[in-house]
Image (spheres, grey):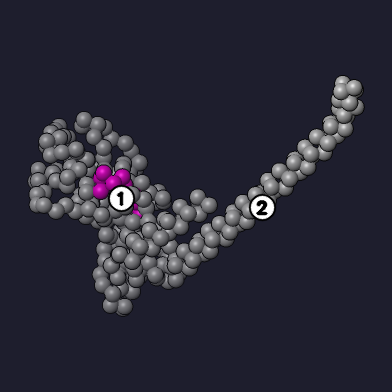
Amino acid sequence: VRELREKLEVSRSSMQADMNKGKVIKALMKQKRQGEIPGIYGRLGDLGGIDKQYDVAISTACGALDNIVVDTINTAQKCVNYLKQADVGVATFIALDKMARFKEQAARKIQTPENVARLFDLVNVNDEAVLPAFYYALRDTLVAKDLDQATKISYGKTRYRVVTLQGQVIDIAGTLSGGGNQVCKGRMGSAAVADIDPRQLVEIEKSLEKTLQIKQYTLVFLTLIQKLQATVQTEEFRENRDRLEEMIRPVTEEVVR
Protein backbone atom coordinates (compact mmCIF):
# COMPACT_ATOMS: atom_id res chain seq x y z
CA VAL A 1 0.00 0.00 0.00
CA ARG A 2 2.82 2.40 0.87
CA GLU A 3 4.49 1.81 -2.50
CA LEU A 4 1.20 2.41 -4.31
CA ARG A 5 0.59 5.62 -2.34
CA GLU A 6 4.10 6.88 -3.17
CA LYS A 7 3.66 5.97 -6.84
CA LEU A 8 0.30 7.77 -6.89
CA GLU A 9 1.78 10.91 -5.31
CA VAL A 10 4.70 10.93 -7.77
CA SER A 11 2.27 10.47 -10.65
CA ARG A 12 0.04 13.29 -9.44
CA SER A 13 3.06 15.57 -9.00
CA SER A 14 4.21 14.74 -12.51
CA MET A 15 0.75 15.49 -13.91
CA GLN A 16 0.66 18.80 -12.03
CA ALA A 17 4.12 19.71 -13.31
CA ASP A 18 3.01 18.90 -16.83
CA MET A 19 -0.06 21.14 -16.43
CA ASN A 20 2.18 23.99 -15.36
CA LYS A 21 4.44 23.72 -18.43
CA GLY A 22 4.12 25.77 -21.55
CA LYS A 23 2.03 24.60 -24.45
CA VAL A 24 5.15 23.70 -26.46
CA ILE A 25 6.44 21.03 -24.10
CA LYS A 26 2.93 19.72 -23.48
CA ALA A 27 2.33 19.39 -27.21
CA LEU A 28 5.64 17.61 -27.73
CA MET A 29 5.10 15.19 -24.84
CA LYS A 30 1.69 14.37 -26.29
CA GLN A 31 3.39 13.49 -29.57
CA LYS A 32 5.73 11.22 -27.64
CA ARG A 33 2.90 9.45 -25.77
CA GLN A 34 1.01 8.91 -29.02
CA GLY A 35 4.08 7.35 -30.60
CA GLU A 36 4.38 10.04 -33.26
CA ILE A 37 7.82 11.24 -32.09
CA PRO A 38 9.12 8.55 -29.70
CA GLY A 39 12.66 9.93 -29.47
CA ILE A 40 11.69 12.79 -27.14
CA TYR A 41 13.06 12.53 -23.59
CA GLY A 42 11.51 15.73 -22.28
CA ARG A 43 12.41 19.11 -20.83
CA LEU A 44 15.95 19.02 -19.41
CA GLY A 45 14.86 20.42 -16.03
CA ASP A 46 12.31 17.60 -15.69
CA LEU A 47 14.85 14.86 -16.39
CA GLY A 48 16.80 15.43 -13.18
CA GLY A 49 16.31 16.36 -9.56
CA ILE A 50 18.35 18.26 -7.01
CA ASP A 51 18.14 18.94 -3.28
CA LYS A 52 15.98 21.98 -2.56
CA GLN A 53 18.88 23.89 -1.00
CA TYR A 54 20.40 24.11 -4.49
CA ASP A 55 17.16 25.17 -6.19
CA VAL A 56 18.20 28.80 -6.65
CA ALA A 57 21.71 27.82 -7.77
CA ILE A 58 20.58 25.38 -10.49
CA SER A 59 17.69 27.60 -11.61
CA THR A 60 20.04 30.56 -12.01
CA ALA A 61 23.14 28.88 -13.41
CA CYS A 62 21.52 26.49 -15.89
CA GLY A 63 19.88 28.47 -18.65
CA ALA A 64 19.23 25.31 -20.67
CA LEU A 65 16.76 23.77 -18.20
CA ASP A 66 13.89 24.60 -20.55
CA ASN A 67 15.59 22.99 -23.54
CA ILE A 68 14.04 19.78 -24.91
CA VAL A 69 16.23 16.66 -24.87
CA VAL A 70 15.85 14.24 -27.80
CA ASP A 71 17.75 11.16 -28.91
CA THR A 72 19.01 12.37 -32.29
CA ILE A 73 19.25 15.45 -34.44
CA ASN A 74 16.69 13.84 -36.77
CA THR A 75 14.17 13.71 -33.93
CA ALA A 76 14.92 17.36 -33.20
CA GLN A 77 14.13 18.17 -36.83
CA LYS A 78 10.83 16.26 -36.60
CA CYS A 79 9.93 18.29 -33.51
CA VAL A 80 10.75 21.55 -35.23
CA ASN A 81 8.61 20.57 -38.23
CA TYR A 82 5.71 19.59 -35.98
CA LEU A 83 5.86 22.85 -33.99
CA LYS A 84 5.92 24.82 -37.22
CA GLN A 85 3.01 22.90 -38.78
CA ALA A 86 0.92 23.01 -35.61
CA ASP A 87 1.83 26.65 -34.99
CA VAL A 88 2.45 25.82 -31.32
CA GLY A 89 5.63 27.79 -30.73
CA VAL A 90 9.40 27.38 -30.81
CA ALA A 91 11.85 25.41 -28.68
CA THR A 92 15.56 24.71 -28.35
CA PHE A 93 16.62 21.07 -28.57
CA ILE A 94 19.56 19.09 -27.17
CA ALA A 95 20.27 16.03 -29.34
CA LEU A 96 22.03 13.31 -27.36
CA ASP A 97 23.78 11.90 -30.42
CA LYS A 98 25.62 15.23 -30.63
CA MET A 99 26.54 15.14 -26.92
CA ALA A 100 28.80 12.07 -27.18
CA ARG A 101 31.92 14.20 -26.69
CA PHE A 102 30.71 15.08 -23.18
CA LYS A 103 30.28 11.49 -21.93
CA GLU A 104 33.86 11.15 -20.71
CA GLN A 105 33.82 14.56 -19.05
CA ALA A 106 30.50 13.80 -17.37
CA ALA A 107 31.92 10.56 -15.94
CA ARG A 108 35.17 11.98 -14.54
CA LYS A 109 35.54 13.48 -11.09
CA ILE A 110 37.42 16.71 -10.48
CA GLN A 111 39.28 18.18 -7.52
CA THR A 112 37.67 21.49 -6.59
CA PRO A 113 38.96 24.45 -4.53
CA GLU A 114 37.96 24.11 -0.87
CA ASN A 115 36.21 20.85 -1.89
CA VAL A 116 33.08 22.71 -2.93
CA ALA A 117 30.50 20.77 -4.93
CA ARG A 118 30.30 20.75 -8.70
CA LEU A 119 26.71 21.57 -9.62
CA PHE A 120 26.58 18.76 -12.19
CA ASP A 121 27.42 16.17 -9.51
CA LEU A 122 24.42 17.25 -7.41
CA VAL A 123 21.90 16.39 -10.13
CA ASN A 124 20.16 13.03 -9.81
CA VAL A 125 18.70 11.37 -12.90
CA ASN A 126 16.58 8.30 -13.57
CA ASP A 127 18.18 7.71 -16.96
CA GLU A 128 21.96 8.11 -17.19
CA ALA A 129 21.65 8.60 -20.94
CA VAL A 130 20.76 12.26 -20.28
CA LEU A 131 23.88 13.00 -18.19
CA PRO A 132 25.85 14.36 -21.18
CA ALA A 133 23.03 16.84 -21.75
CA PHE A 134 23.31 18.07 -18.16
CA TYR A 135 27.09 18.33 -18.46
CA TYR A 136 26.69 20.28 -21.70
CA ALA A 137 24.40 22.70 -19.85
CA LEU A 138 26.42 23.01 -16.62
CA ARG A 139 30.04 22.07 -17.45
CA ASP A 140 32.19 22.40 -14.30
CA THR A 141 30.16 25.13 -12.60
CA LEU A 142 30.87 25.08 -8.86
CA VAL A 143 28.54 25.93 -5.97
CA ALA A 144 29.67 28.32 -3.23
CA LYS A 145 27.90 29.04 0.05
CA ASP A 146 28.19 32.81 -0.42
CA LEU A 147 29.77 35.51 -2.59
CA ASP A 148 32.96 35.69 -0.49
CA GLN A 149 33.70 32.01 -1.06
CA ALA A 150 32.70 32.30 -4.71
CA THR A 151 35.16 35.13 -5.25
CA LYS A 152 38.04 33.19 -3.65
CA ILE A 153 37.55 30.00 -5.64
CA SER A 154 36.67 31.57 -9.00
CA TYR A 155 39.84 33.65 -9.27
CA GLY A 156 42.31 30.93 -8.27
CA LYS A 157 44.99 29.15 -10.27
CA THR A 158 42.28 27.43 -12.29
CA ARG A 159 39.39 29.64 -13.31
CA TYR A 160 35.90 28.32 -12.61
CA ARG A 161 32.38 29.46 -13.19
CA VAL A 162 30.79 29.69 -9.73
CA VAL A 163 27.22 30.15 -8.54
CA THR A 164 26.24 30.90 -4.95
CA LEU A 165 23.31 29.46 -3.03
CA GLN A 166 21.78 32.94 -3.25
CA GLY A 167 22.00 33.02 -7.04
CA GLN A 168 25.01 35.25 -7.78
CA VAL A 169 27.14 33.99 -10.67
CA ILE A 170 30.82 34.65 -11.41
CA ASP A 171 31.73 33.58 -14.96
CA ILE A 172 35.14 32.37 -16.08
CA ALA A 173 35.65 35.71 -17.78
CA GLY A 174 35.33 37.37 -14.37
CA THR A 175 31.93 38.99 -14.81
CA LEU A 176 29.58 38.95 -11.83
CA SER A 177 25.80 38.86 -12.09
CA GLY A 178 23.26 39.08 -9.28
CA GLY A 179 21.30 41.51 -7.18
CA GLY A 180 17.65 42.41 -6.93
CA ASN A 181 15.04 41.29 -4.43
CA GLN A 182 13.79 38.29 -6.39
CA VAL A 183 15.76 35.16 -7.18
CA CYS A 184 15.27 32.59 -9.90
CA LYS A 185 14.00 29.29 -8.53
CA GLY A 186 11.64 26.42 -9.16
CA ARG A 187 13.02 25.38 -12.55
CA MET A 188 14.00 21.92 -11.30
CA GLY A 189 12.33 19.75 -8.68
CA SER A 190 13.84 17.47 -6.04
CA ALA A 191 13.28 14.44 -8.30
CA ALA A 192 13.06 13.71 -11.99
CA VAL A 193 9.54 14.12 -13.32
CA ALA A 194 7.97 10.98 -14.78
CA ASP A 195 6.07 11.17 -18.04
CA ILE A 196 2.63 10.03 -16.88
CA ASP A 197 -0.31 9.29 -19.14
CA PRO A 198 -3.62 10.29 -17.46
CA ARG A 199 -4.85 6.73 -18.08
CA GLN A 200 -1.92 5.40 -16.06
CA LEU A 201 -2.91 7.65 -13.16
CA VAL A 202 -6.45 6.22 -13.24
CA GLU A 203 -5.08 2.67 -13.22
CA ILE A 204 -2.82 3.45 -10.25
CA GLU A 205 -5.76 4.94 -8.34
CA LYS A 206 -7.89 1.85 -9.09
CA SER A 207 -5.08 -0.45 -7.98
CA LEU A 208 -4.65 1.48 -4.73
CA GLU A 209 -8.40 1.40 -4.06
CA LYS A 210 -8.54 -2.35 -4.69
CA THR A 211 -5.53 -2.94 -2.43
CA LEU A 212 -7.11 -0.90 0.36
CA GLN A 213 -10.35 -2.89 0.04
CA ILE A 214 -8.44 -6.16 0.26
CA LYS A 215 -6.59 -4.86 3.31
CA GLN A 216 -9.90 -3.84 4.93
CA TYR A 217 -11.45 -7.26 4.27
CA THR A 218 -8.33 -8.94 5.63
CA LEU A 219 -8.56 -6.94 8.88
CA VAL A 220 -12.23 -7.88 9.27
CA PHE A 221 -11.38 -11.54 8.68
CA LEU A 222 -8.54 -11.46 11.22
CA THR A 223 -10.83 -9.83 13.78
CA LEU A 224 -13.40 -12.62 13.32
CA ILE A 225 -10.69 -15.24 13.73
CA GLN A 226 -9.50 -13.62 16.97
CA LYS A 227 -13.06 -13.58 18.30
CA LEU A 228 -13.54 -17.24 17.39
CA GLN A 229 -10.28 -18.13 19.11
CA ALA A 230 -11.37 -16.24 22.23
CA THR A 231 -14.69 -18.14 22.20
CA VAL A 232 -12.96 -21.49 21.87
CA GLN A 233 -10.57 -20.67 24.68
CA THR A 234 -13.51 -19.69 26.93
CA GLU A 235 -15.39 -22.94 26.28
CA GLU A 236 -12.27 -25.00 26.88
CA PHE A 237 -11.71 -23.17 30.16
CA ARG A 238 -15.26 -23.84 31.26
CA GLU A 239 -14.99 -27.54 30.39
CA ASN A 240 -11.71 -27.84 32.27
CA ARG A 241 -13.16 -26.00 35.27
CA ASP A 242 -16.21 -28.31 35.42
CA ARG A 243 -13.97 -31.39 35.13
CA LEU A 244 -11.74 -30.16 37.93
CA GLU A 245 -14.72 -29.48 40.19
CA GLU A 246 -15.97 -33.04 39.63
CA MET A 247 -12.57 -34.41 40.58
CA ILE A 248 -12.18 -32.46 43.84
CA ARG A 249 -15.79 -32.80 45.04
CA PRO A 250 -15.27 -36.24 46.75
CA VAL A 251 -12.19 -34.96 48.49
CA THR A 252 -14.06 -31.91 49.75
CA GLU A 253 -16.90 -34.06 51.06
CA GLU A 254 -14.46 -36.27 52.94
CA VAL A 255 -12.84 -33.26 54.58
CA VAL A 256 -16.24 -31.93 55.65
CA ARG A 257 -17.13 -35.24 57.24
Residue 100 in sight = no
Answer above or below: position of 70 versus 156: below
Q: What residue is shown with label 1? A: 134
Answer above or below: position of 144 versus 100: above
In this view, the residue in front, 71 or 193, is 193
Of marks 1 and 2, the one in the foreground: 2
Q: Which amino acid lies under the numbered mark 2 shown in the image of this protein? A: Phe
Q: Which residue is found at the position 54% from the left and 61% from the top?
A: 209
- Relative placement, left or right, of 199 versus 52 is right
**Label 2 environment density (alpha carbons within 10 Å; few <14, some 14–19, many ≥20):** few
Most extreme residue toward the front, as rendered? 257
Q: Which residue is found at the position 83% from the left and 36% from the top?
A: 242
Mark number for residue 221?
A: 2
Q: Secondary structure at mark 1?
A: helix
Q: Secondary structure at mark 2?
A: helix
Is residue 49 highlighted in magenta? yes
Q: Which residues are magenta?
A: 47-55
In this view, the residue in front, 78 or 176, is 176
Measured as percent of width and height from the top left, residue 171 is found at 14, 45
Location of residue 31 by image quarter: bottom left
Residue 220 in sight = yes
**Label 1 environment density (alpha carbons within 10 Å; few <14, some 14–19, many ≥20):** many
Quarter containing the C terminus: top right
Answer above or below: position of 176 versus 216: above
What separation in Å lies between label 1 and label 2 (alpha carbons)? 53 Å
